[in-house]
Amino acid sequence: MALVEVQVPDIGDFDEVTVIELMVKVGDTVKAEQSLITVESDKASMEIPSSTAGVVKEMRVALGDKVKQGSVVLVVEAAGAAAAPAAAPSAAVSSASPVVASEAQPSSAAPATPAASGPVQVHVPDIGDFKDVVVIEVMVKPGDAIKIEQSLITVESDKASMEIPSSAAGVLKELKVKVGDTVNIGDLLAVLEGTALAAAPVAAAAPVVAVAVASAPAVAPSPVAAAAAAVSAPAHAPGGNTVGMPHASPSVRKFARELGVPLDEVKGSGLKGRITSDDVQAFTKAVMSGVAQTKAQAAKAPAASGGGGSELGLIPWPKVDFAKFGPIERKEMGRIKKISGANLLRNAIMIPAVTNHDDADITDLEAFRVSTNKENEKSGVKVTMLAFLIKACVAALKKYPEFNSSLDGDAIVYKNYWHIGFAADTPNGLMVPVIRDCDKKGVLQISQEMGELAKKARDGKLGPAEMTGATFTISSLGGIGGKYFTPIINAPEVAILGVCKSTMEPVWDGKQFVPRLMLPLSLTWDHRVIDGAAAARFNAFLGQILSDFRRVLL
Ligand code: CAO
């Protein structure tokens, strides 16, 4: 198999262009005419296609390199005579010189009426080989004052995108196209109200910035490529045009369109902030995994911000100018707060949740915990009340398995494993690390794992596997204070236990009031799966275990 050097073909007037995107890498199989790199001048960006099919053996250019006609882009091991139309590398180059840049000659079918006043018609100028291009963006609106050469619309074929400039100046009276229309050379685009502004001189009136063409199976250089010698395009730097078009090549735009990705929301990681196909993929993954939202999703889903809500038939969230009432400081919410906010809202709205409050006598357990910690002082592992609670909850979950289940359509899924999540307060927001197989672990091991996971959570180092798979969650505010609260169920779990600070209270023992250390418990449960009697029994059983921990063994 022959090694073929793929070179930069005739790119018209452009002397030296910068490589701004590498679209293939060593080892990739490329098709003839597949785009290999994107280059950019100050006027246009172009995708350079491969002259031959095969496997990329060597890249000869890097990001930021300057290239010109004849520069070797890469070396391809040709896939065979049929796939490599050229007999020799040099011939391959000339056969693959499909670059369309710009052309400056106004089309005879695209006249600009040079009127100083009265209506001025603006037509689609000569756009070379392209037919039935789609309007993908309209950059102006009626009433706008239009300058000569100001871009009016962007059109796109599957190979290139182009901004169509105005051939005259004036106030836009009527726009004859909309997004989604297909247009051809000579089509009427807009009518400008003639003003004192001069109409465009013909030579400067119909420049088209042709952006990026990846394939043109012409054996000879295409006529438009030849016309590129006459480029006099206005300076619409592809990434920095005045209308805020995202900086991306046509193939990336097409890719984004196919996936339904709003390109203006994608952050470009390429040179000069250019959006690459990897960026589009990463954005898609982030949205699919729930890490990010598109603006449209955010507008629909009333996440933690309290916006939206229209789908529930609610009145809109109040919009208040707080600054009117006093000084304010606005801070965007962090990523974790946004994600947990959206989850909490869904869980609060979708689950018919009820909370039962109860108290557990932990006087003896606390005494045992304190003495255990004294004995274990040297081990460095501090036994916490939460670790005892986890163990006690596992016993209650085993006795009342519906609390360790999930709803799946009309079925209840009972889990024969006991992974317990615990809410951890972190500088970035609420996180819920999960301790697995708590039925198989002792209180010491649970305490140790809890300490490690809580530290990881605070350091923002928890992995996804450490936050998933819980069957029941405990949210403890015991170290902070409070009496009772109503925790929100962590779906798809069906119950959560909230714990507050234990306090010494007078408890009637049948003969007298005695001081006992009482722990406030708040159990929230999903009424679709659990009923009130079961919840009361669960709490009572939990209370019994906590007051006499030997019951865990039964
Ligand atoms: N009653 C009284 N004191 C308690 C207690 C309780 N129920 N639970 C813990 N304490 C005490 C501990 O004994 C410890 O005291 P010492 O320092 O004297 O030993 C102190 O409070 C601090 O405990 P801790 O917070 O370090 O340990 P923990 O095991 O109780 O909690 C963790 C660990 C990660 C759950 C906790 O740090 C945390 O983040 N809590 C907040 C959870 C939260 O935000 N929940 C709300 C979710 S809904 O928005």
Image (tube, rainbow, N blue to C red):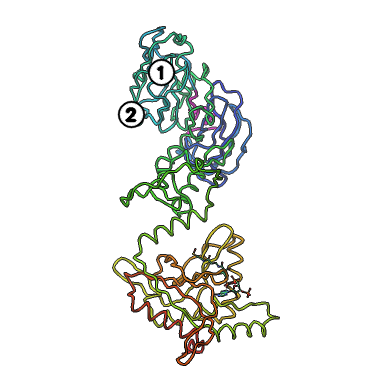
Q: Residue at x 33, y 22 (%)?
A: 176
Magenta residue span: 85-101
Residue placed furthest toward the front:
512
Q: Is residue 130 visible?
A: yes
* Outermost residue to the left: 410
The answer to whether mark 2 is within 8 Å of ligand 1 is: no
The mark tally for this picture is 2
Q: Amino acid at mark 2?
A: Asp
Give the labeled residue for mark 1.
125
Q: Position of residue 27 (x, y in %)?
A: 55, 47
Q: Are marks 2 and 1 in contact (CB under 8 Å)?
A: no
The N terminus appears in which quarter of the rendering? top right
The quadrant holding residue 136 is: top left
Q: Residue 51, can we see it?
A: no
Residue 61 point in image, percent of width and height: 62, 37
- Residue displayed at 54% across by 45% down: 330
The amino acid type found where label 1 is placed reads Pro
Residue closer to the observer: 27 or 192:
192
Identify the residue position indicated by label 2 in the image.
Answer: 181
